Image (spheres, grey):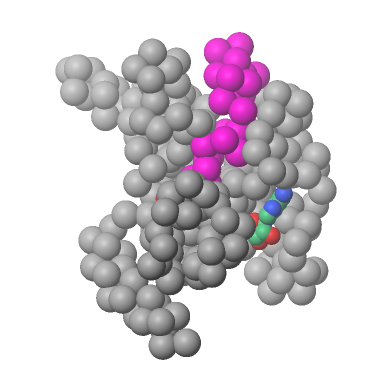
Amino acid sequence: MTRRVLESLTQCKVVLRTGVGYDVIDVEAATEQGIAVINIPDLWTREVANQAMSLLLALNRRVVNLHSDIRSSTWTPRPPYDVGSLHGETIGILGLGRIGSAMAQRAKGFELNVIAYDPYISDEVFTDRGVTRVSFDEMMSQSDYISLHTPLTDETRHIINENALRLMKPNAYLINTSRGPVVEEAALIKALQEGWLAGAGLDVLEKEPPASDNPLLSMDNVVLSPHSGHTSVLSLQLRTGRYGEEVAAVLDG
Ligand code: NAD
């Protein structure tokens, strides 16, 4: 929703963002027009956290590789590549908001040690979530898994750039269910190709859908989903009712 689109909507009173991030709406232009911009931030929290955990587990247990092997008639209960375990490794969470906190809860269920970087929330929230507060660099360098849960802002665009990726352990994995441009994709591709990062689980990409020659599409240590993190039968059922309720609430003042 660009300024040009918003300025053409002369009768419009409210724009409902059906996802979470406001990055797709020019909120300043909408406000100047007297148009309210709202979202339903809690609608997809469980689904996205489950997607992040699914990507982590798929990478750790090599689910996609094993599945592909069976389909090509290779039955390998002891495969030639490493299958991981979750025994108290460390996960770093970037952005301990709704989804980041839900991810922390899930990671603890899998006995992971949870650390996080989020400069905008209080120590009390960290304590309440049972998560250790660390600096950005500490999170990048200490984690075996890093899961991204920030909005896309000027500050977070390419926050995971080559310098940040270089801080990661070479056997670590990056999970991104936030927004594609939070990661500098060219640097990620370089890290995976050159082997200084073990793998990546990505629900979001810089360009969606990706170009067919995007190297990420053909890497064995990458698991992808098509920005479907929010989707479930239940979340899609619930959303229609919630959309109506939220718009009605604005129109009712
Ligand atoms: P939220 O607002 O509850 O949490 C975001 C957290 O990021 C906040 O705690 C904030 O303090 C933190 N943050 C902001 N800037 C930061 C920075 N520079 N460094 C570290 N932390 C920072 O949002 P949420 O509901 O948890 O959603 C998070 C994001 O997930 C959304 O903004 C959206 O981009 C993405 N999302 C993706 C899907 C999907 O389908 N893959 C669906 C919903 C949301």
Q: Front-most of 124 and 17?
A: 17
Q: Is there any visible trace of residue 164 in the rendered image?
A: yes
Instruction: Give the left or right position of residue 230, taking residue 68 as reference.
Output: right
Decide which of 74, 17 is in the foreground and name it: 17
Coordinates of residue 83 in the picture (x, y in percent): 45, 30
Instruction: Provide residue 182's location: percent of width, then percent of height.
Output: 60, 38
- Quarter, ligand 1: bottom right
- Tell me where residue 32 sits by quadrant: bottom right
67 inside magenta stretch: no
Side of 213 relative to 125 (left or right): left
Residue depicted at 35% across the width and 34% down the height: 63
Residue 153 in percent (x, y) is at: 65, 47
Q: Residue furthest bottom?
A: 252
Please indicate, yes or no, whether residue 83 appears anywhere in the rendered image. Answer: no
Looking at the picture, how far across and down is residue 22, in whole percent?
Answer: 53, 55
Q: Residue at x 39, y 26 (%)?
A: 210
Identify whether 174 is placed above or below 121.
above
- Residue placed most toward the observer, 27 or 54: 27
Q: Is residue 90 left or right of residue 119?
A: left
> Which stretch appears magenta?
172-198
- Give the answer, above or below, for where 153 lies relative to 130: above
To which quarter of the image does residue 14 belong? Answer: bottom left
Q: Residue at x 32, y 54 (%)?
A: 231
Count of number-bearing discs: 0
Q: Is residue 197 magenta?
A: yes
> Hey, which quadrant is residue 181 in on the image?
top right
